[in-house]
């Protein structure tokens, strides 16, 4: 696959995109407003953003201040929508609808990427994509990218819409040092950065190389499905019934969804320790360095008990299935394709959520400031009267964990070829509750 790419002039614009300008938006939002909304109702681009922006560009009348505010506010709102798409994808998967699951997971991945880019000062607005300049008060515009033409085996410059521009933007940004710096802090088990772990085991591998690999892997479908128009059309427009897609069994779907949930078991501080540990394990195992207790004691100052625990964890050969699926790329008609795209979307949402949370925390936001966002979300998705909603959204995890244990008990006792219909008949309540992945977004932003 030869995916779309940016020219040198567009790359230069991306390199200079201003994350501090986005931070300034959240920091400067008046206390009386930050606990009520993401963006003022009077913002020129709040509704019909793409159309209004295109009109203003043509008339050389762009309201730069409003535009930058809109880009900033789209960071949390895109990631919130992304988690909703992931939830609906998992719901479709739990009903055996692989076509819908794949379609929705692609959009979860797309929104995650758009959130990450917005955090960095890069907006995606149909065919014109504003990028906040280092000054923080005005923007440059990206409208084109280079696309591979198979018939004459060369790249041609073309206008780039939303679906076709996100991949080259994310791919290039993911190769930059600023992307590595972000990931270095997001994947930090025991409060130790990724760089700190690599140094501890004597690995010289740059975090930047890891970052570039991860972003190219986790955003794979944004490039693959847009470069291969036949696959994209198959996913979005061709009848799934005529494609003869195989139906997954209940045990394999339950195992996958359960393992995905456990990766997002929340901890205070918006962290997902299990996921961070799983990602760290992939990195350190690939380093081929000794991962022993004495190494961790000497280099990281761990107690013998803690060091032994980590050594045992790294020695375990098994990995959660979403981590493995995220590295694979099957044909869109394969049963595994939906599992793979959901996995990649979840990992990209992890980054988008962490990046957005950093803006909010650095701006001094509190959980109470975000009540306007998370309470309505949880009131809709929480199983029970809204009066029973806990004060801290992290307390909702126990309900999810109980449902996962119930589903796992059924899975271990069921026939390996049991259908999803058989499972839903006896665990309808469980099936309903373990689709609410929006909660992971709430935990990541608020807890």
Image: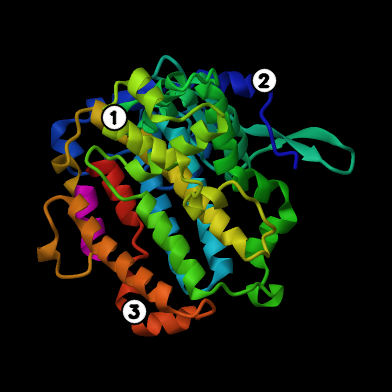
| Residue 124 point in image, percent of width and height | 51, 38
Q: Residue at x 20, y 43 (%)?
A: 370
250 is within the stretch colored magenta: no
380 is within the stretch colored magenta: yes
The answer to the question of whether label 1 and label 3 lie on touching residues, with beta carbons closer than 8 A, is: no
Element class at badge 2:
helix
- Sequence-wise, the earlier of marks 1 and 2 is 2
Q: Which residue is mark 2?
A: 8
Q: Quadrant of the C terminus?
A: top left
User: Looking at the picture, does residue 156 appear above or below residue 431?
Assistant: above
Magenta part of the protein: which range?
A: 372-381
- Mark-to-mark CA distance, 1 and 3: 43 Å
Can residue 388 be seen here? The reply is yes
Callout 1 crowding tier (Cα within 10 Å): few <14, some 14–19, many ≥20: few
| Residue 421 point in image, percent of width and height | 46, 82
Q: Which residue is mark 1?
A: 304
- In the image, 170: left or right of 90? right
Q: Quadrant of the N terminus?
A: top right
**Which of 133 and 213 lies nearest the eye of the viewer?**
213
- Count of numbered badges drawn on the protein: 3
Q: Which residue is mark 3?
A: 427
């Amino acid at each position: 696959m030869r995916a779309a790419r940016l020219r040198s002039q567009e790359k230069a614009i991306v390199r200079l995109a201003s994350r501090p300008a986005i931070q300034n938006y959240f920091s400067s939002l008046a206390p009386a407003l930050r606990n009520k909304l993401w963006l003022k109702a009077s913002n020129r681009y709040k509704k019909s953003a793409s159309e209004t922006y295109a009109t203003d560009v043509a008339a050389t009348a762009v309201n730069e201040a409003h535009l930058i505010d809109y880009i900033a506010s789209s960071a949390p709102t895109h990631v919130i929508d992304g988690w909703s798409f992931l939830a609906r994808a998992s719901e479709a998967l739990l009903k055996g609808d692989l076509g819908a699951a794949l379609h929705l997971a692609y959009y979860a991945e797309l929104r995650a990427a758009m959130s990450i880019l917005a955090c960095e000062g890069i907006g995606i607005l149909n065919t014109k994509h504003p990028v906040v300049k280092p000054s923080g008060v005005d923007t440059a515009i990206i409208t084109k990218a280079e696309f591979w033409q198979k018939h004459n085996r060369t790249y041609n410059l073309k206008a780039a819409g939303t679906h076709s521009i996100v991949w080259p933007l994310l791919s290039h940004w993911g190769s930059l040092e600023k992307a590595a710096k972000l990931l270095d802090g997001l994947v930090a088990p025991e409060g130790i950065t990724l760089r700190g772990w690599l140094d501890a085991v004597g690995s010289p591998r740059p975090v930047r190389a890891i970052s570039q690999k991860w972003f190219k892997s986790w955003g794979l479908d944004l490039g693959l499905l847009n470069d291969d128009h036949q696959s994209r059309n198959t996913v979005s427009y061709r009848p799934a019934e005529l494609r003869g897609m195989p139906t997954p069994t209940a045990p394999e779907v339950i195992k996958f969804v359960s393992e995905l949930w456990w990766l997002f078991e929340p901890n205070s501080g918006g962290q997902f320790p299990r996921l961070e540990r799983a990602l760290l394990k992939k990195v350190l195992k690939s380093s081929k360095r000794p991962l022993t207790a004495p190494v961790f004691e000497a280099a990281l100052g761990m107690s013998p008990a803690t060091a032994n625990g980590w050594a045992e964890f790294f020695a375990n050969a098994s990995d959660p299935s979403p981590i493995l699926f995220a590295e694979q790329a099957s044909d869109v008609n394969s049963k595994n394709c939906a599992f793979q795209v959901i996995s990649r979307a979840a990992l990209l949402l992890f980054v988008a959520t962490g990046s957005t949370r950093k803006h909010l925390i650095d701006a001094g936001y509190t959980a109470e400031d975000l009540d306007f966002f998370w309470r309505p979300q949880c009131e809709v998705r929480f199983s029970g009267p809204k009066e029973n909603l806990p004060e801290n959204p992290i307390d909702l995890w126990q309900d999810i964990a109980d449902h996962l244990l119930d589903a796992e008990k059924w899975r271990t006792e069921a026939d390996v070829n049991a259908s999803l219909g058989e499972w839903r008949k006896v665990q309808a309540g469980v099936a309903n509750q373990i689709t609410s992945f929006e909660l992971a977004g709430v935990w990541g932003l608020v807890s």
